[in-house]
Each structure stands twice: as structure tokens, then as C-alpha cells.
Amino acid sequence: MHEILLFGVVIGAIFSIFASAILIHLGTLIDRFPLEDEGERERTLWSPREFTRFAVIVY
């Protein structure tokens, strides 16, 4: 029984690491390529890249 629980925790951890890396990459892409009607983005705590990093750290 403990092996099944350990296997589930390991699979969940691996999935979380990959999902976090993908989210941070997407936040960086959003910062790098803003919409046409937007100007350059300011790098604040609320910019997509920084906020995504903060959210992943909290997670």
C-alpha cells in the first residue's frame, strides 16, 4: 500500500515540476510579445513573468 502512495506522490511531483516550468515559460513569452495595441510592458510584480514565478513559488 505504501508503494502505491509513494508512486502517486512521485508522479504528482514530476507533473508539478513540468507544469511549473511550462507556466513560467508562457509568462516569459507573454512579456516578450505583447499585443499589437499595447506598448512595452513594465517589469513589475504584476507583469505575467514575475507574477507567474511568484505563483509557482507559492504553489
Image (cartoon, rainbow, N blue to C red):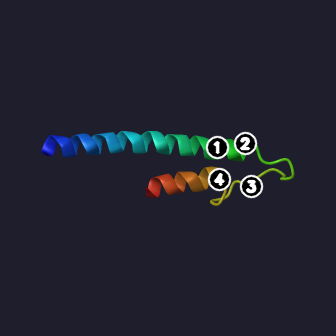
Q: How many marks?
A: 4
Checking the image for residue 32, the label placed there is 2
Q: CA distance from mark 1 to mark 2?
A: 6 Å
Q: CA distance from mark 2 to mark 3?
A: 11 Å
Pair 3/4: label in front: 4
Pair 2/3: label in front: 2
Q: Residue furthest bottom?
A: 46
Q: Which residue is mark 1?
A: 28
> Given the image, on which type of amino acid does mark 2 rest?
Arg
Q: Which residue is mark 3?
A: 42
> Given the image, on which type of amino acid does mark 1 rest?
Thr
* Residue 20, horizontal then vertical, whole percent: 48, 45
Q: CA distance from mark 3 to mark 1?
A: 13 Å
Q: Secondary structure at mark 2?
A: helix
Q: With 20 as the anchor, is 31 left or right in this view? A: right
Contact, CB < 8 Å: mark 1 with mark 2? yes
Q: Secondary structure at mark 4?
A: helix
Contact, CB < 8 Å: mark 1 with mark 4? yes
Q: Residues within 10 Å of mark 2 (few under 14, many from 20)?
A: few
Q: Which residue is mark 4?
A: 48
Q: Quadrant of the N terminus?
A: top left
Q: With 31 as the anchor, is 10 left or right in this view? A: left
Residue 9 quadrant: top left
Q: CA distance from mark 3 to mark 4?
A: 10 Å
Badge 3 or badge 1: first in the primary sequence:
1
Q: Quadrant of the C terminus?
A: bottom left
Q: With 3 as the anchor, is 15 left or right in this view? A: right
* Residue 50, horizontal then vertical, whole percent: 60, 53
